[in-house]
């Protein structure tokens, strides 16, 4: 995927944003779960503390006694993780689970309510302590009541919850990323349609983008269509001006040709030859511009298709009546089912230029043939003329090179190349089996 594409930026941004949100959710949910467990543990310890307070009594001399303590069996098992302790100025009572140890006391214990804190215990690194100061014996004996439980169980439960939550959130991140991908794909689908329409517009000036689109891209569609209207109008004006220019130069050229004939009749052979060369050069330039004007209207469209054999036979029928073609044998070796991806008018332009070039230099034969080979469709024109050397064939197709090595204006192969490239094809020059030049044009299927 292109790192600069809008799709990648949206997907990457969405994936990162969802990941950050889920990581934050994991952190706070784990923290809330741990606090919830601590509150539940504090509630259980408070119930044990209330039972302990209800069983405390003050004996003679201010000594403490416990009529009935909390009933949990863990209070009777040494180092079980669950402890209670009641201490006054003279007496300290404690559960059997403390054995010979004591809970850490604190001066922060309140008399009006239970308070909780985390401290190091006698057997555990983290102990949750719930404590409260009460007054017994008619308010004359202050007593500190403490209930403690190992907090490691809370930490372990929170850790296990965090692991399971992380797995769930990872799956959720994947699901949300896939949903974001689907959302981005659906959201960018109108832009993909615009891209396809732009490709058609690039190939054909008469194409336009769909008049209606999403509100966010409608101004862009309107602007592109307006620009396409201006471009098509400019092309039409350019074609008309080229045609008008060619028509306007016909009369002066005819007058110059008449002057050349009179000069030749008067014996000025050298001057007549110079005029003929100048006239031929001007006519060649006019024909080149007219050819480029025609090629500018060539359309490249995946939906175009035309039968190769029918068009080839029409071109051959015309060439057989020309000065160069009437002495040649033309062979059309094309299957009736072979269709080429361009319009019949464009194929006629291409075949006419290539076959006329072959007829100009052929000695006896010109062969038009083609086939569908793999992923490409090929059309070839062979002749038995002098052909081109490999170096000349490579140079002939260079941009701006004179393709005609025989002294003409070099328009035939130039038109073939331009029409082929305008319709998505390519041209190669090679040695034909009959000894002359092979002009091979191929298009992707």
Image: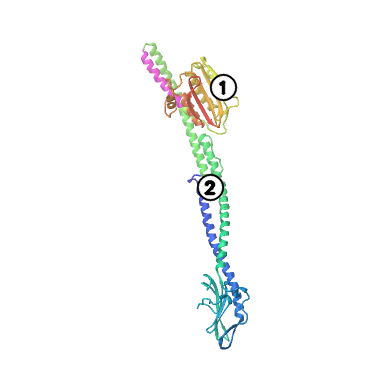
Q: Main secondary structure of the magenta part?
A: helix
Between the C-alphas of marks 1 and 2, the distance is: 54 Å
Relative vertical location of residue 208 with respect to residue 361 in this rendering, above or below: below
Q: Nearer the viewer, mark 1 or mark 2?
A: 1
Tell me if label 1 and label 2 are in contact, CB under 8 Å.
no
Residue 333 - label: 1
Q: Nearer the viewer, residue 270 or 146?
A: 146
Q: Position of residue 441 (x, y in %)?
A: 51, 27
Q: Secondary structure at mark 2?
A: loop
Q: Which residues are magenta?
A: 268-290
Q: Is residue 27 magenta?
A: no
In terms of depth relative to the viewer, which is nearer, 62 or 441? 62
- The answer to whether residue 243 shows anywhere in this view is no
Q: Residue at x 56, y 22 (%)?
A: 333
Q: In the rendering, at what x and y percent does residue 126 appear?
A: 52, 70
Its colouring scheme is rainbow
Between 196 and 163, the one lying in front of the other is 163
Sequence-first tag of 1 and 2: 2
**Residue annotated with mark 2:** 216
Task: Please determine whether, in this image, residue 84 is positioned above or below residue 5.
Answer: below
Residue located 52% across and 37% down the image: 199
Magenta stretch: includes residue 269: yes
Give the position of the C terminus as an image quadrant.
top right
């Amino acid at each position: 995927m292109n790192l600069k594409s809008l799709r990648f930026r949206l997907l990457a941004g969405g994936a990162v944003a969802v990941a950050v949100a889920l990581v934050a959710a994991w952190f706070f949910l784990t923290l809330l779960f741990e606090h919830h467990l601590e509150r539940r543990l504090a509630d259980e310890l408070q119930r044990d503390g209330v039972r302990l307070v209800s069983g405390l009594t003050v004996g003679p001399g201010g000594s403490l006694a416990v009529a009935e303590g909390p009933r949990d069996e863990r209070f009777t098992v040494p180092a079980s993780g669950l402890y209670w302790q009641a201490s006054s100025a003279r007496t300290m009572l404690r559960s059997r689970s403390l054995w010979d140890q004591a809970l850490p006391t604190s001066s922060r214990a309140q008399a009006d309510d239970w308070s909780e804190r985390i401290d190091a215990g006698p057997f555990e690194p983290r102990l949750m302590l719930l404590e409260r100061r009460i007054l017994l014996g008619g308010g004359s004996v202050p007593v500190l009541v403490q209930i403690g439980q190992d907090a490691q169980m809370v930490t372990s439960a929170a850790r296990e919850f965090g692991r399971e939550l992380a797995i769930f959130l990872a799956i959720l991140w994947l699901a949300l990323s896939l949903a974001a991908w689907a959302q981005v794909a659906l959201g960018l689908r109108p832009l993909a349609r615009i891209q396809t329409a732009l490709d058609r517009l690039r190939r054909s000036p008469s194409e336009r983008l769909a008049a209606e689109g999403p509100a966010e891209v409608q101004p862009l569609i309107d602007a592109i269509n307006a620009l396409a209207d201006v471009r098509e109008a400019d092309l039409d004006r350019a074609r008309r001006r080229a045609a008008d220019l060619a028509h306007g130069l016909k009369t002066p050229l005819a007058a110059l040709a008449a002057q050349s004939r009179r000069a030749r009749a008067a014996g000025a052979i050298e001057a007549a030859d110079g005029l003929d060369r100048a006239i031929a050069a001007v006519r060649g330039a006019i024909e080149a511009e007219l050819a480029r004007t025609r090629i500018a209207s060539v359309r490249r469209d995946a939906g175009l298709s035309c039968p190769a054999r029918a068009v080839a036979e029409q071109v051959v029928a015309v060439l057989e009546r020309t000065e160069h073609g009437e002495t040649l044998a033309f062979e059309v070796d094309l299957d009736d089912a072979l269709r080429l991806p361009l319009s019949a008018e464009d194929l006629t332009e291409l075949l006419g230029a290539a076959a006329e070039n072959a007829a100009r230099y052929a000695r006896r034969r010109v062969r038009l043939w083609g086939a569908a080979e793999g992923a490409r469709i090929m059309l070839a024109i062979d002749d038995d003329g002098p052909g081109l050397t490999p170096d000349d064939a490579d140079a002939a197709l260079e941009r701006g090179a004179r393709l005609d090595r025989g002294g003409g204006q070099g328009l035939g192969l130039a038109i073939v190349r331009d029409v082929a490239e305008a319709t998505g094809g390519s041209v190669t020059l090679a040695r034909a089996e009959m000894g002359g030049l092979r002009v091979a044009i191929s298009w992707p299927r």
